Amino acid sequence: MKEFYSIAVDGPSGAGKSSLARRCAAAFGFIYVDTGAIYRSVGLAAYRKGIDRKDPEAVAAMLPELRINMAYDEKGEQRMYLNGEDVSREIRQPHISLCASEVSAIPQVRAYLLEMQRKFARENNVIMDGRDIGTVVLPDAQLKIFLTASPEARAQRRMLELKEKGMEQSYETVLEEIIERDRQDTQRETAPLREAEDAVRVDTSDINFEESFNLLCSVISEKLHIEKAEDKK
Ligand code: DC
């Protein structure tokens, strides 16, 4: 059986995980898997059905009715489908972030999504980003990165990101949401956000995107003994 590389990228929301992991995946010819999008799809489903996201039994009862699929478009962008509908944009709304955080605290939800994530990693070279990839989903990943930044730096970046998407929010609102999600994500009983013991910690508070990208590329090259696709030419 062919062995594939797995790179786990974990860290709090807004640390730049998705944009950096996406860019690194493109540079090394890996598939980028945004696992947060899967939790967001479950959060959206619960929201639409008016289910209390803090009621584990009610959320668990909804799971067998859901068809969640992940696909990649011609640009290599991950798309999420909920019962056949492309919900890739809708799951990015701020109120769905909170729904995602709530349902992700439910053990049945995590168990339900675990195999889907592992299967993907068994069949592809992946850079997978999330909260528990290095600790739970892919404990044998060849490289684990814990990507972090201060709440203030993350709020600034998230605000710009939302603005670009035409979803403007004040700095205070975004910062408050980030602090609340950090609290939920680190204090929940099931798979709380924590750094794997063997993870390489990268703090991007004081470095820009290009610097963070270059730093991650050198960590990947060094640990996995691989070169960026563009350097091979
Ligand atoms: O990365 P994100 O902001 O899109 O994630 C949305 C929510 O899903 C976030 O509150 C944490 C949760 N999540 C998780 O619990 N485990 C993952 N592997 C990915 C995301």
Image (tube, rainbow, N blue to C red):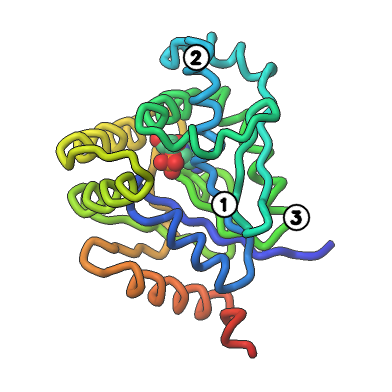
The dot on residue 139 is: 1
Disc 1 versus disc 3: nearer the observer:
3
Compute the Cα span from label 1 to label 3: 16 Å
Q: Residue at x 26, y 46 (%)?
A: 159
Q: Position of residue 138 (x, y in %)?
A: 59, 50
Q: Which residue is mark 3?
A: 123
- How busy is the neighbourhood of tag 3: few (under 14 within 10 Å), some, or many (20 plus)? few
- State the residue lying farthest toward the front: 166
Disc 2 versus disc 1: nearer the observer:
2
- Identify whether 144 is placed above or below 155: below
Q: Amino acid at mark 2?
A: Pro
Q: Position of residue 66 (x, y in %)?
A: 66, 22
The numbered mark, 2 or 3, whose residue comes first in the sequence reads 2
Q: Which residue is mark 2?
A: 56
For residue 109, what is the image quadrant?
Answer: top right
Q: Is residue 226 visible?
A: no
Q: Secondary structure at mark 2?
A: helix
Asked if disc 2 and disc 1 are in contact, CB closer than 8 Å, the reply is no
- Quadrant containing ligand 1: top left
